[in-house]
Each structure stands twice: as C-alpha cells, then as structure tokens.
Amino acid sequence: MRGGDWLRLLVLSAVWGASFIFMRVVAPVLGPVVTADLRVAIGAGVLLLYFALIRFKPRWRAHWRQYAIVGAFNVGLPFLMFSYAAQHIPASYSAIINATTPLFGTVFSVLWLGDSMTRTKGVGLLLGLLGVATITGVGPPMAASASFVSAILACLAAAASYAGAGIYIKRCASHVNPLESAGCAQLFAAVALLPFWFVAPPQGQVDLNIALNVLGLGVLSSGLGFLLYFRLVRDIGPARAMMVAFLTPLFGIVWGVAFLGEALTPAVLLGAAMIIVSTLLILGSATRARPLAGKAGLP
C-alpha cells in the first residue's frame, strides 16, 4: 500500500469513528428515528448528487428489490439501533460493539452458506463474546440499568443486521454496483423511516451544534464515507480495506474521550482489544480461505 492509501484508510476510519459521537450528540435531542432518517436522507442526497455529476443512472426498475432489502438491513435498521443506543451509552461502547459484525458474519456463513467452523474462527468468536462481556459486565454503575442493557442489545442487533445484509448481498445482490446500492439503499431507508417520525418525534430543541452534527453524520459518515470506502476497495482490494474494521473503534474511543469527555476505563480498553483481536482472527481466516467481498460493518 502507498502512503496515500494509508492516509485515506486513516481518514475513513476517523470519519466512521466520528459517526458515533455525532449520534451521541444528536440522538438524545432528535430521537433515534429522526436521527437515523436524517442521516440516510442526507447520505443518499450526497451519493445521488455524485451520480448526477458523473452521469451515472441507477437501474431502479431492475434493482429496486435489492435496494429495498439492503436499505432495510444494511442501512435503516443498524442506523436506527445505533441511534437508540446513543441515547443511553457512551459513543465508544457503540463503536467497539460495531466491530463484532464479523463475528455474526461467521455464524451466519456457517448456518446459511455451509462454511466450516474452523478452530481459529471458534477462538475468535469466543474472544469476541468475552470482549462484549468484559465491557458490559465490568463497566460503570449504569451497567445494571435496563437502558444500558437494551442499548448494548441494540448495538449487537445492528452488528447482526450488517452481517445478515452482507450474506444477502453476497448471495442475491453481488451483481449490483456496490456504490449504486449504497446510495439507492439509503434513499429507500429514508422513505421507509419517514412515517415513524409521527411515532417518535424530535425530543428537544435544535440548535447550531445539533445541526452541524447532523450534517457531519449525513454528509461525512454516510455520504463521503461511502465514496471513500468504495474507492479504497477499488484501489487496494477488499481484504486490505477491511482494516477499517480494526481502526474505526479505536477512533471512536479517541473521539469520545477527546470531544465528549467519556471515561477510558481498563474494562473498555480490555474489551476493545479482545473484540479487535477476535475480528482480526476471523477476517484473517476468511482472507486465507477466499477473497473477501463484503463489508465489516459500516457505521
């Protein structure tokens, strides 16, 4: 990899790590539904504008079903779950648990694709589970609260949804241009979430700080972030681009401490290290078995 590739990888990881602090700021004010919907709507707008500039026309009639399913499980549901979690737990917790996506991907691949469960994968799964247990069981006093537990479960549901969407993309949507799918799926997700505004309207007053964080979430994390990711995949290959899965939680921790004053406890560091190592074991095993074509959880 060239120096420019490393720089883009670090920038992408920093941008996706920042998405968790954006949600941590916005979700308590706007609520999870509005936060998630604004994110995907703005992200879709950025990508569709890019399509217009390069004169690329999505194949709506041919691929609408794939857009809808990917939009639901790779965009809408995960973003909604992380936005819900952002109301109750530190941004660093969400960023770390997002890295469990390959763990769920391994389980789903064994169950649905007939992949073998190797010893390395098994060790990775066990280590990842222990990492989550370390964060949730040896965390701050709020660990005993129902809201804390529900937020952790929401993050795990988001990671599982990413993994399930990855399996679907591999089996049923591999013929769709990935960037096309990212833009159009976000548009479908934005439309699907819109009716729920009436069920869960904004909960606070919007000021300049909230507006800027919403723009950061939509423009940077869901718009330009996707463009940068797929450019990286094209230039350095999907296996190397997977390194973003290890770097994103680290940036999530750094940004949470630097901008939100979150506590950096030994339990968080230990749990993060265990989850990242488990991800490394699982993705390393998958890379040796066959080239990777999916994503390790897009925040």
Image (cartoon, rainbow, N blue to C red):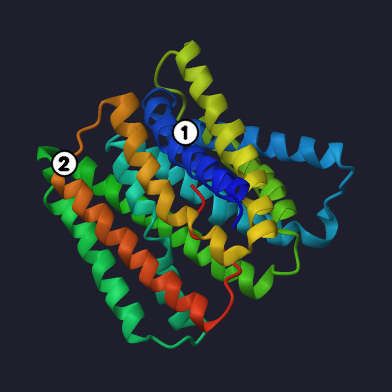
Q: Pick whichever, 231 or 19, lies toward us.
A: 231
Q: Identify which amino acid the numbered label 2 is placed on.
A: Thr
Please give the residue where the numbered disc 2 appears in the rendered image.
Answer: 265
Q: Is residue 168 above or below residue 259?
A: below
Furthest-right residue in this view? 55
> Can residue 132 be seen here?
yes
Which secondary structure, mark 2? Answer: loop
Alpha carbon of mark 2 to alpha carbon of mark 1: how far?
A: 37 Å
Q: Quadrant of residue 20?
A: top left
Instruction: Please tell me which residue is depicted at 53% across the width and 40% down the height of the picture.
Output: 11
Which residue corresponds to the image point at 48% horizontal and 36% vertical from the top-left? 33
- Secondary element at image label 1: loop
Q: Position of residue 43 (x, y in %)?
A: 64, 37
Compared to residue 106, the image places residue 176 above or below, namely: above
Q: Report x, y in % for residue 295.
A: 55, 61
Question: Would residue 124 be found to the left or right of residue 45 on screen?
Answer: left
Check disc 1: other Cα within 10 Å, few if <14, some if 14-19, many if 20+.
few
The mark found on residue 199 in the picture is 1
Q: Could you tell me residue 219's position as x and y percent?
A: 61, 31
Based on the displayed image, in which of its 4 quarters is residue 45 positioned? Answer: top right
The nearer-to-camera label among 2 and 1 is 2
Which mark sits nearer the N-terminus, 2 or 1?
1
Q: Nearer the viewer, residue 141 or 2?
A: 2
Position of residue 170 in the picture relative to residue 138 (left or right): right
> Which of 226 and 2 lies nearest the eye of the viewer?
2
**Pointer 2: residues within 10 angstroms few (<14), some, or many (20+)?**
few
Left or right: 37 in relation to 109? right
